[in-house]
Image (tube, grey):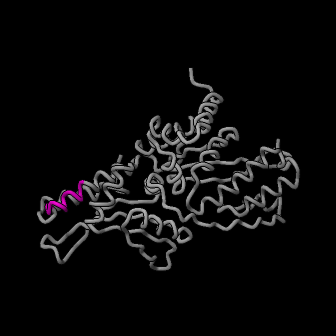
Amino acid sequence: MPTPVSALIHAATMVYNSGENNENIHKNKLNLNPWYVTGYTDGDGSFSIRLRKSSDSKFGYKIIPVFSIGAQNNPNNTELLEKVKDFFGGVGWISSSDNMKHYEVTSLDSLKIIRKHFETYHLETSKHIYFLLWCRVMDLLEKKTHHTLDGFINVLAIKAVFPKGLSKDVLINYPNIVPIQKPEFLSNTSPLNPNWISGFVQADGTFGLNYIKSSRSKLGYTCQPQFRVTQHERDLVILKRIITAMGCGNLINPSGGRDRYDVSVANIKDITLLIIPFFEKYPIYGAKLLDFQDFCQGITIIKNKEHLTQQGLERLKDLAYNMNTYRKF
């Protein structure tokens, strides 16, 4: 017989109330470090407010706070999202949409568990601002302030500053909404937790073997390995903090008017002595783990100078064209 959701919520809450042993409990039981979950969320998670038309709601819309994490739809990523779901005590559900999988939580009681986690293991990117606003809406719902017109308008004013803002339908019905003043994001300057970095790379990092033509190579081709983390310019500071924490990497400026920046590590010595040992100690999961394993194979081939032979180069080509977006499941 399945465990009642209420019991799962109680169990997860008890874990969060256990104080400083919280991190070790999660790590030992579920193999996901709490900071890893926060880093993963900083990359691929979202805190949003959903407005759903409802004839039962006093002002025509039901207000639904949502926590979600998305990943490409494949068995390895599905297993990872299941781990995240287990980490939060089994609350929420996992669904499929096109080529994506989503872990989503919308119940107010369940979202209290989510909130408690991120209040303890705080977000490091500008996503933290939307978490704070999301919490503000949860407080309004908890106090039932949204049942008054002023409270409902307050929710709309908060949602208006979220990335997707208010829909045309909502604006037609409530045309005079004045968005709140969005809080300023002040980046933390303390050293990043390595487990956070691992989770963030899970979302926004890439392990690549770039197989390219080369006039300098006797074989006509070469392979240039690269570890990369990409982020929007509004979170440029987080890339600088990653470079500091990992002890290597170059910050690549965007070209062609792009608003994205990269941390790039292409030096074999740095990859061998810093990058690979780091992710062996602080592992990633899902399909990206397969990319990391293939990346390590490629680095071994290059270190052994096997890439200077046709056979070794072919092995690198096979690895390169079966990683990342090329990988088939």
Which residues lie in the magenta part?
297-306
Work out whether 193 lies above or below 267.
above
Work out whether 120 lies above or below 92.
below
Q: Nearer the viewer, residue 7 or 156?
A: 7
Q: Position of residue 246 (x, y in %)?
A: 39, 62
Does any portion of residue 100 appear in the rendered image? Answer: no
Q: Is residue 288 magenta?
A: no
Q: Residue reaching furthest bottom?
A: 256
Q: Position of residue 188 (x, y in %)?
A: 57, 63
Q: Position of residue 243 (x, y in %)?
A: 42, 67
For residue 320, which quarter of the picture? bottom left
- At a point 41% along the width and 68% down the height, the residue shown is 263
Q: Is residue 299 magenta?
A: yes
Q: What secondary structure is the magenta-colored segment mainly?
A: helix
Left or right? Give the position of 256 relative to 320: right
Left or right? Give the position of 173 relative to 223: right
Picture quarter with the N terminus = top right
Q: Position of residue 325 (x, y in %)?
A: 38, 57
Q: Residue reaching furthest front?
A: 20
- At a point 50% along the width and 50% down the height, the residue shown is 35
- At a point 52% along the width and 73% down the height, the residue shown is 259
Q: Nearer the viewer, residue 237 or 232?
A: 237
Left or right? Give the position of 129 relative to 231: right
- At a point 43% along the width and 69% down the height, the residue shown is 262
Does any portion of residue 299 appear in the rendered image? Answer: yes
Left or right? Give the position of 177 relative to 129: right
